[in-house]
Image (cartoon, rainbow, N blue to C red):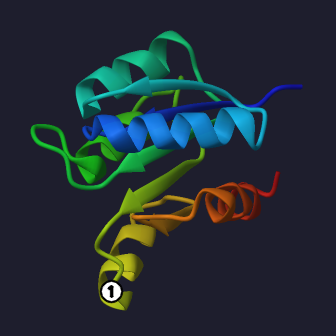
Amino acid sequence: MTRRVLIIDDDATIREITAITLTHVAGYEVSAASSGAEGVASARADVPDAILLDVMMPGLDGPSTLAQLLDDDKTRHVPVVFLTAKVQPSERARLEGLGVRGVIAKPFDAMQLVGDLNRLLAW
């Protein structure tokens, strides 16, 4: 069974690098959204197996996007992993307290991303 991962990030380069890595290294099926609102709509339309969610985005930021995903019966069960450049211990703890599976620091090593994601999601 191919795992399906939705990447929600406003940075096109991050979306592209992440998608290439997850597709070619891990064999995942990847879709992407460039904003929180687009990501919520995409997740509701075609529920993924996991979501990689950027924390800092204009408009609907990561925590607000997560709140909408958790408030919807269709997407509530989907594991979410935050991607963020802010990895101070206090910020990481705050983010993990919002109900995500984990936090992955940006920039990330492509091979480490796959390992971290598999570990956090127990895949």
Q: Residue at x 75, y 56 (%)?
A: 118
Visible in this render: residue 78? no
Q: Residue at x 38, y 44 (%)?
A: 14
Q: Which amino acid does label 1 sit on?
A: Gln
Location of residue 67 (image quadrant): top left
**Residue 35: x and y, percent?**
25, 31
Q: Say how many tags the image has.
A: 1
Q: Which residue is drawn at 52% across and 43% down?
A: 18
**Residue at which label 1 appears:** 88
The correct choice, above or below, for 18 with respect to 38 in the image is below
Residue 29 located left or right of residue 79 = right
Residue 52 located left or right of residue 64 = right
**Residue 54: x and y, percent?**
34, 50
The quarter in which the N terminus is drawn is: top right
Visible in this render: residue 52? yes
Find the residue positioned furthest to the left. Answer: 59
Residue 7 located left or right of residue 21 = left
Location of residue 19 (image quadrant): top right
* Secondary structure state at the residue bearing disc 1: loop
Front position in the image: 18 or 75: 18
Residue 96 located left or right of residue 86 = right
Front position in the image: 64 or 38: 38
Q: Residue at x 56, y 64 (%)?
A: 109
**Residue 26: x and y, percent?**
77, 42
Crowd class of label 1 (few under 14; some 14 to 19; many from 20; radius 10 Å): few
